């Protein structure tokens, strides 16, 4: 499957171009902010690296969150525009699954499961437990920091994501806990998005090219402070 994948859900900004199991190009930077200025040039650079035009792809893949409000919309907007221009379908991948895919090891089924945790601020985190092959073992959820440790199975889990350090501190002295060192990766990445999108396509086929494009996954309701009434 020829895929162009984009990830801007968290602090990273990345593009991957893959053909089956072969990575033709990969560009990634940790930005924190500024995805809108960097994503389109990064895609152009990746296409040049691979020596192809965007029309080469059979499908597009994008991370849909949870994550940064602005970053998510940057990636989704670019992919929606490409999908419309090229007449290609779009496959949605959550940022929690993409995080797990960064460290998943399908060749080691006995390895520890992966707990993907994203700092959601306000003493909360987005969290989801995955198998060593990045198959979901729980639903994606917004949880208080103190409640995330309950997702960790008795044998422990490999923690990955921006919320790992926060949870490890809260879970100190508790059993079960994280196994050994937590993974270094804190950003989801387009390579993981591409890998999971290819798995979805193999299992369910390509979405229709004219299907409604995916939207952002928000696990928390918008936080709006209304102005005081005028007297």
Image: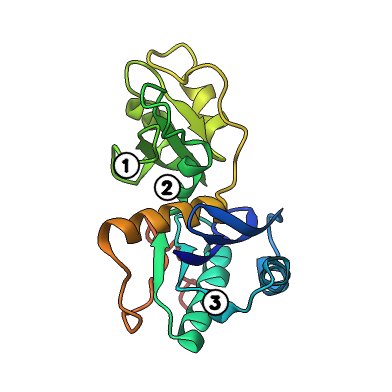
Residue 130 in which image quadrant = top left
Few, some or many C-alpha atoms within 10 Å of disc 3 (few <14, some 14-19, many ≥20)?
Answer: few
Please name the residue that numbered disc 1 is placed on. 136
How far separated are the C-alphas under marks 1 and 3? 31 Å
What is the number of the mark on residue 56? 3
Q: Is residue 119 left or right of residue 112?
A: right
Q: Is residue 124 left or right of residue 102?
A: left
Q: Note whether 202 is above or below 181 in the view shown.
A: below
2 and 1 marks in contact (CB < 8 Å): yes
Residue displayed at 50% across by 66% down? 3
Residue displayed at 41% across by 34% down? 106
Please name the residue that numbered disc 2 is placed on. 97
Of 11 and 53, nearer the camera is 53
Of 24 and 136, nearer the camera is 24
Q: Position of residue 185 (x, y in %)?
A: 60, 38
Query: Number of marks in the image?
Result: 3
Q: Visible in this render: residue 7?
A: no
């Amino acid at each position: 499957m020829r895929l162009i994948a984009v990830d801007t859900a968290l602090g990273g900004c990345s593009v991957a171009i893959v053909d089956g199991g072969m990575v033709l190009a990969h560009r990634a930077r940790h930005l924190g902010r500024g995805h809108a200025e960097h994503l389109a040039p990064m895609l152009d650079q990746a296409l040049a690296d691979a020596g192809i035009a965007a029309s080469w792809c059979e499908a597009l893949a994008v991370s849909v969150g949870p994550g940064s409000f602005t970053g998510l919309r940057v990636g989704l907007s670019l992919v929606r525009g490409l999908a419309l221009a090229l007449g290609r379908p779009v496959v949605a991948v959550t940022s929690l699954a993409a995080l797990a895919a960064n460290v998943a090891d399908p060749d080691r089924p006995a390895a520890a499961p992966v707990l993907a945790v994203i700092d959601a601020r306000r003493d909360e985190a987005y969290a989801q437990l995955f198998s060593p092959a990045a198959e979901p073992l729980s639903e994606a959820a917004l949880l208080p920091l103190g409640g995330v440790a309950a997702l960790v199975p008795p044998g422990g889990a490999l923690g990955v994501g921006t919320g790992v350090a926060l949870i490890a501190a809260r879970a100190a002295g508790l059993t079960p806990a994280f196994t050994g060192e937590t993974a270094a990766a804190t950003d989801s990445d387009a390579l993981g998005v591409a890998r999971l999108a290819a798995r979805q396509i193999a299992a369910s086929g390509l979405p229709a090219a004219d299907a409604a494009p995916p939207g952002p996954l928000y696990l928390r309701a918008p936080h709006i402070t209304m102005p005081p009434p005028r007297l």
